[in-house]
Amino acid sequence: EVQLVQSGAEVKKPGESLKISCKGSGYSFTNYWIAWVRQMPGKGLEWMGIIYPAHSDARYSPSFQGQVTISADKSINTAYLQWSSLKASDSAMYYCARDVPGDYWGQGTLVTVSS
Amino acid sequence: QSALTQPRSVSGSPGQSVTISCTGTSSDVGGYNYVSWYQQHPGKAPKLIIYGVSKRPSGVPDRFSGSKSGNTASLTLSGLQAEDEADYYCCSYAGTYTLGVFGGGTKLTVL
C-alpha cells in the first residue's frame, strides 16, 4: 500500500527555522517526484515545488523560489520542506503528494508561526 | 485572485447531477490536456479524482467525470450522494516554469 506519512504539527516563533518531513512507503521512492503543496487557513491549494529523490533535483514554483528549500534523503525514503526564517504568513497546512498531479497525498503538517 | 476561476459554491439533491466549471486561458486549461480535479473533505487531505482532463484514478467511481471545451474544464458528479459534499479544486498545467495553477475551489453542498 502506497503511503506518505508526514511529520507532526509545529508551533514556531517568527524568525525560527523549521524542517518538516514526508516519508514514503509501499512503492519505489526514487522513481517518483514528491511535490509540496501549501494550503493557508480557509484558502485554496498552491504547488510549492517538487523533488526527484533519485537525483535530489528540486524545482520551485516562482512564488516559493528562495522562500523554502526542498530536499530528500533517498536512503530513508524521506522528502523535506524547510524554512530558514519563518514568518507569520507561513502559517498553513502543508501537504506532500506523490508526483504531479498527485495520486497519493500525505495527511498534512500544520505549521503555526506566532510570537 | 486564483489563476483558474471556479464557482464558489454549487448544490444539488441526492441522485441529481451537478457540474463544476473551471475557467482559465489558452495558456493553461485551453493549451494543454493536463487538467486535474481534487476532492477535499473538511480537515482531510485532497484526493485526486480526475487527471488528464477525463481520466479517473483506480477506485474513483464513474459517477465522477471530467471534460474540457476551449478554456473551460468541467467536473460532473452524477447520482449525487451525501458523501460527495466537499470542496472541489481544479488544476491545470500552465507551462514549463510552473507546476500548475489551481482554481479557488468550489464548495459542493448536497441538500
Image (cartoon, grey):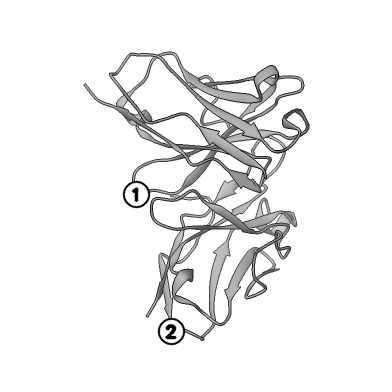
SS category of the residue bearing label 2: loop
Please name whichever residue, B59 or B90, is drawn nearer the observer in this view of the structure. B59
Percent from the top left, x then y, of residue B71? 65, 63
| Disc marking residue A42 | 1
Percent from the top left, x then y, of residue B24? 59, 58
The image quarter containing residue B38 is bottom right
SS category of the residue bearing label 1: loop
Q: Classify residue B12 as left or right of residue A88.
A: right
Q: To which residue does mark 2 refer?
A: B13
Q: Amino acid at mark 1?
A: Gly
**Where, quadrant-wise, is the C terminus of chain B in this rendering?**
bottom left
Question: For the residues tagged 1 and 2, is the chain the same?
Answer: no
| Disc marking residue A29 | none
Q: Which of the chains bears the disc numbered 1?
A: A
Percent from the top left, x then y, of residue B37? 60, 58
Which residue lies at the image location 34% right of the left edge and 43% below the top edge?
A41
Q: Amino acid at mark 2?
A: Ser
Mark 1 Cα shell of 10 Å, populated few (<14), some (14-19), many (≥20) = few
Please name whichever residue, B3 or B80, is drawn nearer the observer in this view of the structure. B80
Percent from the top left, x then y, of residue A88? 30, 27
**Res B25 visible:** no
**Res B104 visible:** yes
Please name whichever residue, A54 or A37, is drawn nearer the observer in this view of the structure. A54
Which residue lies at the image location 74% right of the left edge and 54% below the top edge?
B32
Single out the mark in the foreground, 1 or 2. 2
* Residue A41 vertical position relative to residue B25 in the rendered view, above or below: above
Which residue lies at the image location 52% right of the left edge and 25% below the top edge?
A21
Work out how far the residue at label 1 is from the one at label 2, CA to CA, in angstroms. 25 Å
